[in-house]
Amino acid sequence: MASVKMGALPSLRKQQLLSEFTGLKQACPEGIFVSLTPGDATLWSGVLFVRKGPYCPAILRFQISFPDAYPQLPPLVTFSTDMFHPLITPLTTYVYSTEIEDSGTVSASDQERLPPGGFSLRHGFPDWFGRGRRSMIEARRASGQQASSPGPTGSISSATTTPASSAGKPSYMRTGKKSVSAYEVLHYIRSTFDDEAVLDSVPLAAAGNPGAWHAWRTHRRAAGKLTEDTTAAPSQGDEKPKEEGEEASEQTQEKATPTSPAVTTRHPGEWNWDGVWEDRVKKGIASSLSEPVLYGGTNTADDLIKFLPMEDNDVDSVKENLRRTLGQSA
């Protein structure tokens, strides 16, 4: 009998999440603290203390909501602390689709849309995304045809490793896919705040905030850390530079289409982003450290992790009590 991926059975989903959460007590990415919602193992509250890198020393609140099909489908990570970040959708935005390379619009049925504050996992875990390509590959396998088109550049590889015979099986019977743990998700989230190289490698197609993406790259070029937009080069999902023939064709179409006084729409890549990243991030960090945000102004009433203003003597007393408690339990 073929082995069954027991962790993916719906009846064991809650136990799997509880097990992952328990594991985080022993090994959690540095600077991240998470808490379970009482009675709901699928909703986690977290706080990220950025201790190094471009967003240091911000303190950011977030929530992780795990779908019923996790780990086959990605969790939804939402930040309640406003921060100008290439992967975080602005809090003032309604929805933003993670499938921007396939369609410029967002429909009500778009299952990969991000809410305000949503964190895009597309760059770190590409196998979770690209629903159109997955559907096409599975359809070809189900009909016995061999998929002849190459996979996306550089990343979505394990989505093509599922045996052909598994195309019609339920998700919990498919054993060829590598599961992504909550630890890996948390570790990736932290790396996008404290590691410049990770942010440099994010393509525009994976950005949750295209404006912040352009501002970050402008900042890096001004600092001499980035010489060319390798992630903006023509590839699947990125905006491609227009060829001369395409430009001529578009100009012809514009001339043929009668319009009222033209209003030129500038794309984010055409804006002047000099100094924008530094200014917006500096303000965001200062706001995240302000007393109203830390001690009383949480955006969610049911936030499980709260801070208390304490004097140095009180902090030392708490540390001593912790050491005494840990020493007794050792």
Image (tube, rainbow, N blue to C red):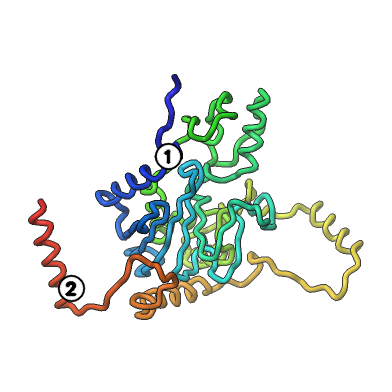
The quarter of the displayed image where residue 310 is located: bottom left
Label 1's element?
Answer: helix
Query: Which residue is nearer to you in this view: 12 or 295?
Result: 12
Discs 2/1, front? 1
Relative height, residue 250 to residue 263 (above, below) = above
Relative height, residue 143 to residue 80 (above, below) = above
Q: Earlier in the sequence, mark 2 or mark 1?
A: 1
Mark 2 neighbour density, 10 Å: few (under 14) some (14–19) many (20 or more): few
Residue 267 image offset from top left, x and y in percent: 68, 66
The dot on residue 11 is: 1
Number of disc labels: 2
Residue 254 image offset from top left, x and y in percent: 86, 63
Label 2's element?
Answer: helix
- The residue that appears at 44% across and 36% down in the rendered structure is 9
Q: CA distance from mark 2 to mark 1?
A: 43 Å
Residue 82 image offset from top left, x and y in percent: 47, 71
96 sits left or right of 325 in the view:
right
- The residue that appears at 57% across and 24% down in the rendered structure is 165
Residue indicated by mark 2: 315
Which kind of residue does numbered mark 2 sit on? Val
The quarter of the displayed image where residue 211 is located: bottom right
Q: Quadrant of the N terminus?
A: top left
The dot on residue 213 is: none
185 sits left or right of 133 in the view:
left
Relative height, residue 160 to residue 96 (above, below) = above
Query: Which residue is nearer to you in this view: 322 or 211?
Result: 322
- The residue that appears at 49% across and 43% down in the rendered structure is 69
Residue 46 image offset from top left, x and y in percent: 37, 61
Which kind of residue does numbered mark 1 sit on? Ser
